[in-house]
Amino acid sequence: MTEPNLDLTENNTDINESGDETNVSGQSISLNPNFDSEDAPSTAVASGNDTPKEDLSGQISNEKSEEKMIEIKNEEKAVESPVSEEIRDENEIHEIEVESVETDFHEDFGSFAKKDFVNLAEKMLASLSSRELSISDLKNIDSVLKEIKPLYEELHQNEKNEAKKAYVAENGSEEGFEFKNDNFSIRFESLLIQIRDKKQSFFHKLEQQREDYFEIKTKLLQKLREIVDIEDKGVHVKDNWEAFKQVQSDWKAAGNVNSPHNGTLWSAYNALVDRYFDIRSIQNELKDLDRKKNIENKAVVVAKIEAIAEKLKTEDLTNSVLKRANDLLNEYKQIGPGIRDEQEALWTRLKSSFDVIYEKKRELNTENKQLSEEIFGAKARLLENLKPFTEFKSDSINEWNARTKEVMAIQDQWNAIKGPMPRDRAKEISKDFWAYLKQFFKHKTEFFSKLEAQRVQNFKAKEALCIQVDEILASNDTSAANTNKIIDLQKKWKTIGHVPEKYKDSLYNRFKASCDKYFEAKRTESKDQDNEYAVNLKKKQDICDEIEKLTKKGEADLSKLTEYKKAFAAIGFVPRKDMQNIQSRFVAAINEFVKASTSLNKSEKEKLMLQNEVEVVLKSGGGSKNLDKQENDLRRKIKGLEDEIALLKNNIEFFGNSKNADKFKAEYEQKISKAEVELKELGNKLKLIIEAS
């Protein structure tokens, strides 16, 4: 019978000097029983567009290969091979693909910066230098490159646009703009070129190996054909035996390279070997001995595979275990044929063991699929949580900062979820997530750009005030009219909002320095004025002394309080260094005067003391820091009371119509009334400060 067109395990039979057959290892070519060696595409073509194109010499080589294959097939048909039928069943058991983790570079690239893309490209370049590099590794790298190139280009283009925008803002036009690539861009482009060169080198080497392999094998077949013819003639038997042994050794040393002609080469080789043994009178005896030895070797391998299958009944399948099982399967296939009945029994045991391994692999795939679905579900929920933020709008900086913290928390959760998602949906959900993030931060940038534009306007307005003060200062006129202008400009300064942060301190210091310089010039205008200020200080000190003495004696007559305040306010300016001290002393004196009075209750005293301070500060032109502090304190107290009243009113709603409900309601209503009275008093105090200001 002729050798069928199957994906065969290469079987190479060697013979020792005593005449016994011994097995020589080969390698599995394909596991598809319908594989047609004539129509199968070469590995280089299947790998993608990066495969180097064949030149004219390659076409000629292929034509020669086809001619030689016709000769080999004719040789194969001329000899009936008993090997093919015996190894048919062995090829029904396929190798299980071991998942590669070393070259799987797929990640969530949406959050990558330039540095991350460069690091990834360096890892891919390093993997291309691996001695165990396979075509599937190259396909994986190609897939990653197709995914990251547009992302990197988008990142690069955004940087270029931002640089151009900044250039136009600074220079008024695009003329003269030149964007220079940074070190990351230069390195990334260099890495892509090196990766391309590595891929071309790999496919060129693979193609050369295929051509060399085919050439060597066909020459060895021709030599083996000559040896068979010599054996058939019965001349030079001993020398012919050594030549036969040498061909077997050379065939094994030639190794194996994936080629569409492998099946035919091996079939022709096995056919010639069988024909050689048919010629030798001792062939049948040698085959029996060799097949018995093969059965023993196969039994050892089957036992090892059965041990793996038994262990997998209680343990998980790992890549290392899977690789070990595949190696043993290859070892089994590379052992020559054995006695038919015993080989069928071994094959049945082998198939049963691999059924267990197949089932474990299916379970592992199911678990991985379930895990990937769970990861996808978790990220889908985060995507839904993020979606509302894409429509967020606000005019409050605090609200934008608060929402940003929430968005960053969602992003941290997304990045914390590790593991693959279903490949058909992973790219889309990642794309949506990072698009939502970009949309939120785009709106935030628009808000702060608008805010910054307003601050620029504020800067221009305050700068104009600085110029006005400088003009007044340059006139050397410290008249009352100019003094009033300076004071008006100071008030106007306070009504203008914030300026850009980088100008905040410098602009304020400029304005303050000019105002201080003006008033300093006004103070030094006349030495007589200094004496006047000293006299005024003495008058104010005398008023304080009088009030303090009356307070100490307990003679606090509030009817005199208004006179004291009018007298104090009527006195002119005092030396600048004493201004704050005398004002604070007077406020303290009249407040103690009020406290010593017995005609007012506590609340009335507090209100009167606050009114005293407001009047003194504003009429004397002193600092209002203490008033600002009191205003803030009052606002905090009012807010606390409002919250307390709202809570009490809310709690009343929970009381029913039970016997004890009225008692509790009464207590709560009493608390509410008390809080409302206090709230009203605080409101009056606050109103007093605001109106006075």
Image (cartoon, rainbow, N blue to C red):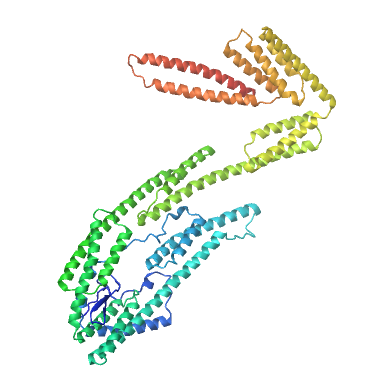
Q: Quadrant of the rendered structure where residue 135 is?
A: bottom left
Q: Quadrant of the rendered structure where residue 235 is?
A: bottom left
Residue 206 pos. (x, y %):
40, 74
Residue 120 pos. (x, y %):
47, 59
Depth check: 377 or 452 in front? 377
Tell me: residue 554, above or below residue 106: above
Residue 205 pos. (x, y %):
42, 74
The residue that appears at 42% across and 63% down in the rendered structure is 141
Q: Quadrant of the N terminus?
A: bottom left
The residue that appears at 29% across and 85% down in the rendered structure is 242
The residue that appears at 35% across and 84% down in the rendered structure is 64
Residue 88 pos. (x, y %):
21, 72
- Please give left or right for residue 281 compared with residue 386 in the image: left
Depth check: 465 or 624 in front? 624
- In this orientation, does residue 95 appear? no
- Please give left or right for residue 215 compared with residue 348 in the image: right
Tell me: residue 408, above or below residue 127: above
Q: Quadrant of the C terminus?
A: top right
- Please give left or right for residue 567 compared with residue 420 in the image: right
Residue located farthest toward the left when viewing the structure as drawn: 341
Residue located farthest toward the front when viewing the structure as drawn: 18
Depth check: 570 or 330 in front? 330
Tell me: residue 381, above or below residue 149: above
Depth check: 642 or 128 in front? 128
- In this orientation, does residue 607 appear? yes
